[in-house]
Image (cartoon, grey):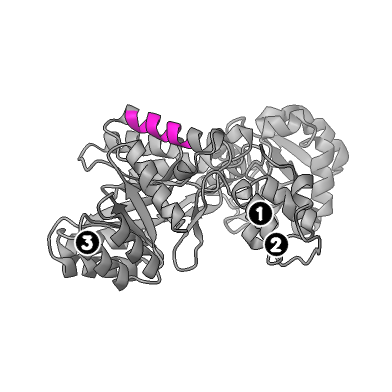
Amino acid sequence: MALTGLQIQKLLPKTNCRECGSNTCMAFAMKLAAKKAEIAECPYASPEAIQVLGAASEPPVRGIALGPDRMLKLGEETVLYRHEKTFFHQTALAVNINDTDSSGMIKQTLTAIRDYRLERVGETIRIDMAAVTQRGTDVNAFAEVATKAWKTTGLPLVLRSGSPAALRAAAIAIKGSRSVLAAATQETLDELHSIAKDNDHILAVTAPDLDSLFGCVAKLRESGFQDILLQFQASSLAAQFQTNSAMRRAALKDAVKPLGYPFLRFLQDTDDLLKIAAAAITEIDKYGGICVLPVFDPALMAALMTLRLNIYTDPQKPIQVEPKVYPIGEPRPDSPVFVTTNFSLTYFTVSGEIENSGTSAWLVVPECEGMSVLTAWAAGKFSGASIAKFVKGVGLENQVSTREIVIPGYVAQISGELEENLPGWKVLVGPQDAADIESFVKMQKSKGKVQNGD
């Protein structure tokens, strides 16, 4: 039975020392109850508290930190569905290279991994990891490619080999990167456990069935080793979906500790990008920890990263931009003024279309709690009065000489109210869809109502 925050607080030292990172012991107790902290974070916990709370406070899915700065985090999830609460640590995407690839291909792929960037609703997204698979038999060649991958990308790696000797050589070569060794079997578990522990790497564990996987992880847990990933290669897409779901449910709902670790999956090497996409989408949708793609394709990467961003965005906290007046291009005092809400997707869509129209402009973005235009209007957050108050509050009238402001077509009904609250201003009703901004601007230019602004 789960303990409440009050029950846990009774077992804590009640010193409010703040050394755990919380302001009070009660706040720390609430974190323990929510499985957002571990009792080991309290430096003054009694042996009794450690014994009682140790297992109870452990997150159902163990948190794993990768990279030399430990900034790439996996696990620590507490719900099966994000609408129940939220998901915290998104699926890490990696791209594979083989030690038998040509030096030119290896260099090209590693450079692409290092340099890839995707701009999406104000966020810059990059590839999280690189993977190196041993296809040949030369231990030193595998270690050299791993070293090259680490030095080129600066990212944690996934090292895949069936040879403990090769993994040992590579693990030593990139010590300090806090990477992943894949994968320990029942036969190699003890040896690879030692290699991972000695070089501060994560150990992926694999087995032909879940019972054997359970046994291997249980053995590692008994030794005190917790830097574990589960690598269970499914035979089909349906099996991948079912296995991931069953293991995550066992960890979250039934508290099966040996299955409470992030997953590692290598996608099948194929020339069919649609098959790769389907498998990667399933992994992202269904609790993937690290998903290793067999090839680098920028279009595929953009699609997967956009999907991942959508899934791992807290549905209760819309992505929003800072409320202020944004210059689009190089606007002058007489450049046109547009207004929209501070929902990130709305802002970046509108600002992008204004820029595409070839017009420099001022974009007024008032506080709307991250809501879209119609939602904000319906909630009373995007009205003529609120927009006028914001315009006056930021001193826009002193910044621009124009006295025309363009509002979204979907809220044409607020034009009268806005003009009443902004004396001397004329409201222009813009298009309903951002995609029509360019044609709207051209039409206004032809009427002489919008300046070029360049």
Quarter of the picture holding the N terminus: top right
Label 2 Cα crowd, 10 Å radius (few <14 / some 14-19 / many 20+): some
Residue at figure coordinates x 18%, y 60% from the top left: 99
Of badges 1 and 3, the one in the foreground is 3
The image position of residue 445, as x and y in percent, is 59, 42
Q: Which residue is mark 2?
A: 45
Q: x, y (%) of residue 303? A: 40, 41
Q: Residue at x 72, y 29 (%)?
A: 412
- Residue 385 among magenta residues: no
Q: Quarter of the image holding residue 449? A: top right
**Figure check: 408 above or below 422:** above
Which range of residues does the magenta coloring cover?
239-248
Viewport quadrant of the C terminus: bottom right
Residue 347 horizontal/vertical position (percent): 61, 44
User: Does the segment drawn in magenta span residue 243?
Assistant: yes
Q: Which mark is residue 326?
A: 1
Give how far apart the Cα atoms at labels 1 and 2 are. 51 Å
Q: Which mark is residue 106?
A: 3
Q: Label 1 neighbourhood size at 10 Å, few (<14), some (14-19), many (20+)?
A: some
Seen from the viewer's position, the closer of residues 182 and 330 is: 182
- Residue at (46, 39) in percent of width and height: 287
